[in-house]
């Protein structure tokens, strides 16, 4: 039984970790941290928790003192994560960090997007935990940087074309749409029901913090500098994310061929489904599951490949991927606690 | 491994049975029926189905010929269920029926609400499958009538007061609200997104078909005729149901005492949670789970007990209860495949 | 041209006043107040404001110094309203107050629900501005207490039975459901999209502050003490309110007769529509309009009248009613700026 | 008083015409047609219609016999529109057609996307009714082809750059998102609440019928062939549309300059608002209004202009634009009946 800590357990990714891990046969949640709901039992915060999952919730710092656990999930703001990670690693606890603190390998890049790093010495020790790309490195890691939600869709949507002739990957145009839980659980006017419901809007056009992460990974995969043109939008749903990716292709490239390339690339990946021609990914068909649905089309009129990727931003985009990483780190079946079908409708 | 059939597998309760049973370690779905999507594999209809769950879908009738199965779930329109049930029972298949065909013990009552019964001879053989009330009978049954969603909330909300002095149960007033999946999966104008979204309305005030079922069970529990005043409304959510129940009480009856009666009544029920004072049931906190959340308050100004009950209409109100019944019928842990926490948010 | 001030112009009822008044041919908005967005022009806060409506927004207090206006709408928290009202009245500005400060005639009742009153001397001077009931008094008033949204539905739903034999009005049971804008515009966790969306819940069962207002008006109408059993719920829509009202009736009372009583009662009211039998009120069919839709049914099995009332809580439940009152106060056509049909879908 | 007919009055664009025209001081709706709700009065179909707007609804054909009207709006399926238009024009009725029948000037292009044209002889007589571009032609027209919703956003979003150096317009990439009312009012499974709610998906990637319309107008504006890369998606809202447009620009082009170009281009257009830097268009801020909100940003990292355009697809994308055209055709103030501010929230 893995003894597990969840830091930031009352945010949406923390809550989602509780949900997923409650089905995990080899995990026991020992304790969680929360600024807002400290010093309660889980069942006082989540009315649906049963007595056998009823772990205590404390402030952050008490939980870092002599943590008697095997593994910790950090669902903390960036900065806080770096500090907590060091303490946990020093106590022999393996760490899966859902913040951005260890995703960027280049310190200068990190600091230009996020400000001063709280523990740059750990950057080299961390592994970028997108299992479909870095599975082997995750296996031995004691500090895993869980990928951002947007980068998960973009990297998985572009990675298969690495060796395809006739695809211009130098300038992917990515138009992404995210459910509102991506903005976190704090009370904010712009994510209130009346402001965000029955609406749809872009919320940035030039500088989302997830861009350097996409570019780092794609540049590494393609062995050249990739610059991503990225626009995020807000969908009035709690969960769900779709990225629509545009890549210029040569007129010879065939849609059926390209789809086959994707199928081959993901043939051993149980969470990634390449959809048949004419079927489009829908967030409602991945909700609550760790699945990634990808559709690939080539537009013969304009010679563009359009790659559409859907995930649940809280599962494959956050907590599901984190549990997938934990399963890999401990040599368990990779889909343990992650086999649930989507909740549809 | 129980060999299982799902009739009406592409409706919402059928889809939900697939979702729940996909986690069941002792069940294998052999085949399903569907009028609209016959002659396909499940994965062609549900893009998220994995290859190891990929059962065939056929028309209804081929599936009734020599059914080689242990148990069948009927998610069919009433009338069709009665016919299918007979054939299956004759072939030695135990039946859990999600329609109304076997819920009412009195033939005349059934026929006054639903029209001519297609197989009244089976009425005596069936058991009303609300496990919290009829667990022992379900155990030995080969034909279980799975309860309606509204009756589940109403019966569970009123049953605990059977032996409480000072509660007038002769005229419960029940104001219920249901998510739109309760109307089924057919394309209808009044359940289209633009007509039902961003709206709220009663959809009947005097004659919902679930009334006789509530009255039958409550009258039996209380040993006297109970007449329910029932109004259903439509909530713009896919899943979820709340019933707000009003019972006149004597001025002496104390709110804390009444809540304690509920807690005692359900102390061994793992799916029913009686909420602490001041916490109200929310469909968002039971979504996707088999839980029932109940709040009990007494209004000292007006001397009414207000009992508020929330379920997911597709889980505890339909497919989850059906799997719970199956688990009981086969002597398995009652919560097998039903332990999932709610999907929140 | 009436020179108009809107206090609290950036809350939802303030915004709605701007929307409605922008169509009013005899009104000019001179200025508004806002704590959060002071010292801007309206067009900086509302991107859709055109240059000819572009009034200045200031803090509350500067706007109270020598207000050069004819009429002021107070969309302020209770307490603040009382203070502002006195200042405005002293400067000769007529006041329409959307808070609760002047709705309750009995000071002790007010103080038991809201705490100390900031200016009880004004209670006698105020008129309860439900035009359908108090039109004549509104005409001459210089301080109008605009009704609460819930009381509007409840009073209009029960008033017509004043002279009907066989209706027991002593204990109306009222089950109400409100859109989320009713909770105001502040950022709160429980009204955030992810917490309130795809959910439905009661949010109180015994002590909503709108109760004394209902009881005051109904008791006055019926000439006897009326005690209301009231439960509010939250619907996942921005706007809309439905109250379902239960009244015990004698077995002789006929549904067609009762509906006719309602039609007669409201025959000269252009905003109130009594629906034909079998048609139920739907918030989606009143959204954005000042209309009130009422359905009346008698349940012959249980001998209850069920009265269902729908409004847009921000229009007839707040800002529309306020403009209706202003129109009456100034002898204008009562429906000026209020003729817009609902926005459907 | 203009005597007006609305064909297809019970679809969403027909309903919206009724809503908008109900505020028009110079228009009287004489009659409407509907296949599903023929032979009723409007108030039987729309419970909110008042007695003074209560026009009769008939089948299509009776309404085409000797139509005694000045102007007709056709909210009919393509094909049906062409036939009706001829009859009406022959009777001296001016026609505003909301279908696609007269939008494409090139017959072969029409027929390759829509099939055989029912009255190609009228193509030359029609005017493409995007007022901001073709106002003068609309003035004298007796047959106006009202633009599609997607083309409205795309043409208005790109037209201002006609004379800007350093913008590559040959290959606009357009990622569009539409509310569900765009799919019309028929009952369909994929637009039902449970299938489309809490979801988001692309619904085509290579061949939407609105593409030739965008290309025709843009090619004409730019004096060269423009090919649009277009992907439509479905947003879970009733109303609203956002197009995000990507244009490659030269590194010298400045964001402030480009925004200024847009402001100049639309300086006399009362329905088009170019938003300040950092403010993004939101469907919730145009809902129910005829406004177009445009944000312009240049991404200095990738040298792309990102132009984001929001409208209400039923207003500026359909019925509002149609009324705007009527106002122009009859020399009335262009914003008559179109001044309403958005319904927010």
Image (spheres, coloured by chain):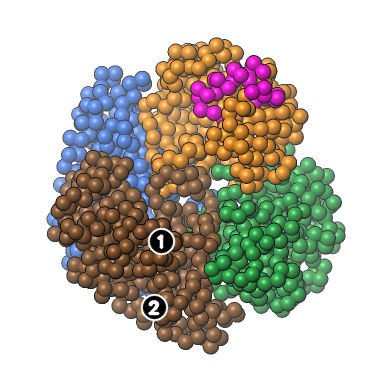
Chain colours: A orange, B green, C brown, D blue
Q: Position of residue B28 (x, y in %)?
A: 77, 45
Residue A125, above or below C220: above
Please give the name of the residue rendered at 65% of the width and 59% of the height, measured from the top-left corner: B256
Point out residue C36 in the picture as x, y percentages from the top left corner.
32, 42
- Which residue sits at x=33%, y=57%? C118
* Residue position for label 2: C221
Say what secondary structure mark 1 lies in. Answer: helix
Name the image quarter holding the C terminus of chain C: bottom left
Q: Nearer the viewer, residue D4 or B334?
A: B334
Segment tinted magenta in the rendering = A65-91
Q: Nearer the viewer, residue D180 or B172?
A: B172
Which residue is tagged 1?
C111
Q: Chain of mark 1?
A: C
**Residue B243, how many percent across, how many down?**
59, 62
**Dot 1, crowdedness within 10 Å: few (<14), some or many (≥20)?**
few
Query: Which residue is nearer to you in this view: B225 or C137?
Result: C137
Name the element at disc 2. Answer: helix
Of circles 1 and 2, the one toward us is 1
């Amino acid at each position: 039984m893995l003894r597990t800590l969840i830091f930031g357990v009352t945010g949406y990714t923390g809550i989602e970790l509780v949900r997923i891990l409650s089905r995990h046969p080899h995990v026991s949640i020992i304790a969680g941290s929360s600024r807002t709901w400290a010093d309660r039992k889980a069942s006082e915060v989540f009315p649906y928790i049963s007595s056998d999952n009823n772990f205590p919730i404390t402030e952050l710092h008490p939980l870092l003192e002599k943590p008697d656990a095997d593994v910790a999930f950090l669902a903390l703001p960036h900065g806080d994560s770096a500090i907590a990670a060091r303490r946990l690693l020093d106590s022999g606890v393996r760490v899966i960090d859902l913040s951005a603190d260890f995703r960027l390998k280049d310190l200068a890049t990190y600091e230009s997007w996020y400000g001063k790093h709280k523990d740059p010495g750990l950057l080299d020790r961390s592994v970028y935990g997108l299992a479909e790309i870095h599975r082997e490195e995750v296996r031995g890691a004691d500090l895993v940087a869980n990928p951002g939600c947007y980068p998960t869709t973009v990297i998985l949507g572009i990675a298969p074309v690495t060796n395809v002739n006739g695809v211009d990957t130098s300038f992917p145009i990515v138009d992404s749409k995210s459910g509102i839980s991506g903005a976190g659980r704090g009370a904010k006017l712009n994510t209130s029901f009346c402001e965000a419901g029955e609406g749809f809007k872009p919320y940035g056009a030039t500088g989302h913090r997830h861009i350097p992460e996409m570019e780092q990974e794609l540049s590494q995969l393609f062995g050249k500098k990739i610059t991503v043109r990225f626009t995020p939008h807000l969908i009035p749903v709690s969960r769900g994310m779709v990225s629509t990716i545009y890549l210029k292709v040569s007129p010879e490239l065939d849609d059926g061929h390209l789809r086959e390339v994707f199928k081959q690339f993901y043939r051993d990946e149980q969470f990634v489904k390449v959809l048949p021609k004419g079927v489009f990914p829908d967030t409602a068909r991945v909700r609550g599951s760790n699945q990634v649905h990808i559709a690939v089309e080539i537009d013969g009129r304009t010679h563009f490949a359009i790659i559409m990727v859907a995930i649940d931003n809280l599962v494959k985009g956050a907590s599901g991927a984190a549990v997938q990483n934990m399963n890999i780190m401990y040599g368990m079946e990779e889909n343990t606690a992650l086999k649930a079908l989507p909740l549809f409708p």
